Amino acid sequence: MNDSKEINFHLHLVSDSTAETVSSVARASIAQFDGVEIEEHTWPLVRTKAQVDKVLKGIRETGGFVMYTMADKHLRKHLKKNCEEMGIPCISAIARMITVLSEWMDKKTTFHKPGRQHELDEDYFNRVEAINFALTHDDGQSVWDLEEADVVLVGASRTSKSPTSMYLAYRGFRAANVPYVTGVPLPDIVHKLKNPLVVGLTISPDVLVQIRKNRLLSINEQKSTDYTDIERVKEELVQVRRVFTKNRWPVIDVTRRSVEETTANIIQMFEKRKYQREKGSK
């Protein structure tokens, strides 16, 4: 094997869930090799044949290596069959991954470096920086440099903006969130953002009222206010939806979604937007 050569390739991570497992396993495996640079493509929430076909289109355009975690055997078979036809390695995240990667890249692992997947590399520091960014740009803070964000979340109070921002940061994305308050215009800069992906978060009025009531109870506040009045909340959500529509921002309904699922959706949007921009610049 030629251990001195530099390796650069596209890595496609396909999952029927949030892609956390396949992403973690892939990074831990790649960390076992010196001189390897990858361009990661994450495909979360792939649960239908049509979605697999969309993934296959992306794989066909870039080539590379495919790793997956999918429970549906028919979808797995469809993915693997098409990858085989393209001559592209496609393995489960629980397969003998390091061995397969080693054979495919013609490169030995560096097993003499224990705990290597946890070393303080550039990815680690980028993640720390993303977390600091999310903390300093939470709940409408530091709006003057929102253009530096990867993702900006907008929504009414208690629509999971902050936890979603932090989860995005954990995944390495510089996320900020800005609250919508009835009668208070959003900062002008939010409407003019060019670089970040701006995403609107919404929720069912009934669920939002219950969440807000629980929040007030947690701080021993039991007075009835407009904050938890169902009719006021309905109007608030209608108003913020108009703002989303006016600015043509994509919208995610978080009513029945976990923070992890919402984050996976946003990352999917981000990657699609990034690909379209790169394709349009060529």
Image (tube, helix red, strand yellow):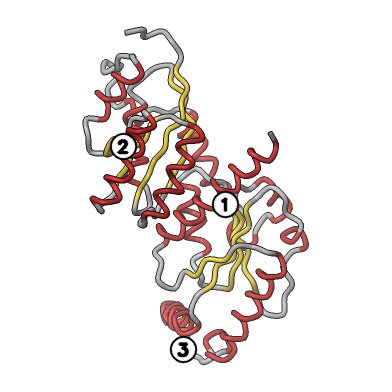
**Which mark, residue 25?**
2
Looking at marks 3 and 2 on the same chain, the residue that comes earlier in the sequence is marked by: 2
Q: Position of residue 247 (x, y in %)?
A: 71, 65
The Cα–Cα distance between marks 1 and 3, rounded to whole angstroms, is: 33 Å
Residue that label 1 marks: 175
The amino acid at mark 2 is Val
The quadrant the N terminus occupies is top left
The amino acid at mark 3 is Gln
Q: Position of residue 64 (x, y in %)?
A: 43, 29
**Which mark, residue 189?**
none
The amino acid at mark 1 is Ala
Residue that label 3 marks: 222
Graded by Cα atoms within 10 Å as few (under 14), some (14 to 19) or many (20 or more), the crowding at tag 3 reads few
Looking at marks 1 and 3 on the same chain, the residue that comes earlier in the sequence is marked by: 1
- The secondary element bearing badge 1 is classed as strand
132 displayed left or right of 68? right
Depicted 3 relative to depicted 138: above or below = above
The Cα–Cα distance between marks 2 and 1, rounded to whole angstroms, is: 24 Å
Q: Nearer the viewer, residue 153 or 5?
A: 5
* Quadrant hosting residue 115: top left
Verify CB contact (< 8 Å) between mark 3 and mark 2.
no
* Quadrant hosting residue 200: bottom right
Query: In the orientation shown, which residue stands out farthest toward the front?
Result: 85
Verify CB contact (< 8 Å) between mark 1 and mark 3.
no
Residue found 58% across the figure and 58% down from its top? 138
Q: Nearer the viewer, residue 260 or 137?
A: 260
Mark in front: 3 vs 2: 2
